């Protein structure tokens, strides 16, 4: 019997389990938190209370993997959104144009999205959830990983297990670490003799505060609102999105010492300080429900660069590439990993390993996953690297620096030009690569806009 072990019931872990269930006899998802059927925030994902945007690309990939996904979200009350028509985007250049498009998905809480994916994954007969257990080590050596060592976690309020209790072994054909930013992989690999991967960290010291509000009565012509200044001169921003249950999630962000407070008065004052009063006006009469805050760094563990990588082992989601959640890419990148994993599973070499029940070589898989994460990483780090004093800014590289300057011009022109706005939104929603920003007509409009501003006619 061929078994895959997925460490972490994150969205990336659930996507991996769903894909692996098509080809393997059994998939075991190991999760340290104890889970319920409700759409609750997991202790292991404290950032789940903040804005989580399901971009168009992620929505498409998830509906392909889970045909009932959209229906389940709709039944739970998740609003549908057209990102070009229903989202109001405000920059120093003013309000961006809005128009109907095919860039549609749904806005919902992270907890609801994850619970929906988890339920759909566990409906597959060969997927099993082992919650309340944590992986405390790898089984194998520097050449091959053949399983994980597990230890149950005591239920809250119960007597802790005796210290030194012997972990149990769970063996499998493939182990996928999808345990998130706090992954133990570097230490666990070192314990079996594998070189620890290099890490790139780009940290703009961004902080964000979130409050959930009950949507107040009154008409408004948007379902999502984004208000952003341009770094390095301006680092404050905020967003509002409708959630299931007639609620708004409202997140404010700032860099360095410019951190948004979580108390009601301070939160409102910070909102009022943004470049537009529209967000502060929207929440002025809304009923606040919850506060929160988090740190936001980009971190890439470059396992794709290692010359020797053990067979039978892979990383997924934030365990490999964790993006600043301010840009709302994480869930979509996790969904994008699904077809990458499926393509690797269907490759000739992996099929042979599966047929012979021998551990599969996973070096090629890690390189494929790295290529899938490259565009989101570039978009997030190029933006963060503009903020003064950012840790690791030089790691963004020359390409990132060029992209920063060009995207500045794109954003200025997008506030006045529908075609430019469409292209920028398509790239932001990950449905097109950055080459779409170099459409000849977009290039021409950016160039003429720059020339006009240099003549003293700003934002034309």
Image (spheres, rainbow, N blue to C red):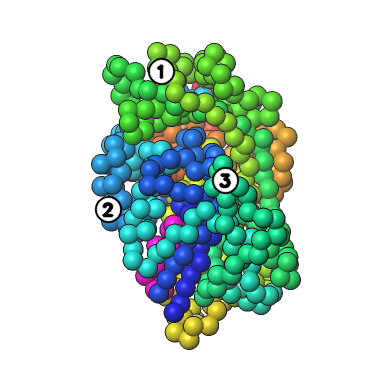
Start-end of magenta stretch = 14-24
Query: Of callouts 1 and 3, which one flags the residue occurring earlier in the amino acid sequence?
Result: 3
Query: Which residue corresponds to the image point at 54% horizontal and 29% vertical from the top-left?
Result: 292
Disc 3 or 2, which lies upstream in sequence? 2
Q: Which residue is mark 1?
A: 287
Mark 3 closeness class: few <14, some 14–19, many ≥20 residues within 10 Å:
few
- Asked if residue 4 is positioned above or below residue 229 in the image, the reply reads below
Would you name the residue on which mark 2 appears?
A: 68
Q: Which mark is residue 158?
A: 3
Q: Secondary structure at mark 3?
A: loop
Gap between marks 1 and 3 measured at Cα = 37 Å
Q: Is residue 228 above or below residue 404?
A: above
The stretch drawn in magenta includes residue 210: no
Question: Left or right of 364: which side holds 65?
Answer: left
Task: Name the spot of residue 381 as percent of width and height, x first.
Answer: 61, 44
Whole-percent x and y of residue 406? Answer: 55, 41
């Amino acid at each position: 019997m061929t078994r895959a072990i997925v460490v972490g019931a994150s969205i990336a872990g659930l996507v991996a389990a769903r894909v692996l269930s098509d080809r393997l006899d059994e998939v075991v998802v190991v999760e340290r938190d104890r889970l319920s059927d409700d759409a609750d925030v997991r202790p292991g994902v404290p950032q789940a209370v903040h804005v989580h945007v399901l971009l168009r690309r992620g929505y498409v990939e998830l509906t392909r993997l889970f045909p009932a996904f959209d229906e389940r979200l709709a039944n739970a009350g998740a609003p549908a959104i057209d990102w070009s028509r229903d989202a109001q985007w405000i920059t120093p250049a003013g309000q961006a144009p809005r128009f109907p498009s095919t860039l549609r998905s749904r806005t919902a809480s992270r907890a609801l999205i994850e619970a929906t994916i988890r339920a759909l994954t566990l409906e597959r007969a060969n997927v099993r959830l082992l919650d309340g257990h944590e992986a405390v080590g790898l089984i194998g050596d520097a050449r091959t990983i053949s399983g994980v060592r597990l230890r149950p976690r005591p239920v809250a309020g119960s007597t802790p297990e005796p210290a030194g209790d012997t972990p149990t072994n769970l063996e499998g054909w493939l182990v996928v670490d999808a345990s998130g930013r706090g992954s133990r992989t570097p230490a666990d690999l070192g314990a079996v003799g594998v070189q620890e991967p290099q890490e790139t960290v780009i940290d703009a010291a961004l902080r964000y505060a979130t409050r959930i509000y009950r949507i107040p009565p009154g008409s408004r012509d948007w379902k999502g609102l984004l208000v952003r200044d341009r770094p390095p001169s301006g680092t404050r921003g905020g967003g509002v999105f409708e959630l299931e249950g007639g609620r708004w999630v409202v997140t404010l962000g700032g860099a360095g010492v410019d951190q948004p407070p979580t108390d009601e008065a301070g939160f409102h004052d910070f909102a009022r300080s943004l470049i537009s009063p529209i967000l502060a006006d929207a929440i002025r009469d809304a009923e606040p429900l919850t506060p929160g805050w988090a740190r936001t760094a980009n971190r890439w563990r470059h396992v794709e660069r290692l010359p020797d990588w053990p067979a039978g082992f892979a990383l997924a989601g934030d365990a490999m590439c964790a993006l600043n959640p301010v840009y709302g890419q994480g869930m979509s990148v996790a969904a994008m990993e699904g077809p990458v994993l499926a393509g690797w599973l269907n490759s000739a070499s992996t099929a042979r390993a599966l047929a012979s029940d021998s551990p599969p070589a996973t070096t090629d898989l890690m390189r494929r996953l790295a290529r899938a994460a490259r565009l989101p990483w570039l978009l997030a780090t190029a933006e963060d690297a503009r903020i003064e004093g950012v840790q690791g800014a030089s790691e963004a590289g020359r390409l990132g620096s060029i992209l920063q300057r060009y995207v500045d011009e794109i954003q200025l022109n997008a506030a006045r030009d529908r075609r430019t706005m469409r292209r920028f939104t398509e790239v932001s929603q990950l449905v097109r690569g950055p080459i779409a920003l170099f459409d000849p007509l977009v290039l021409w409009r950016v160039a003429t806009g720059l020339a006009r501003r240099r003549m003293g006619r700003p934002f034309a």
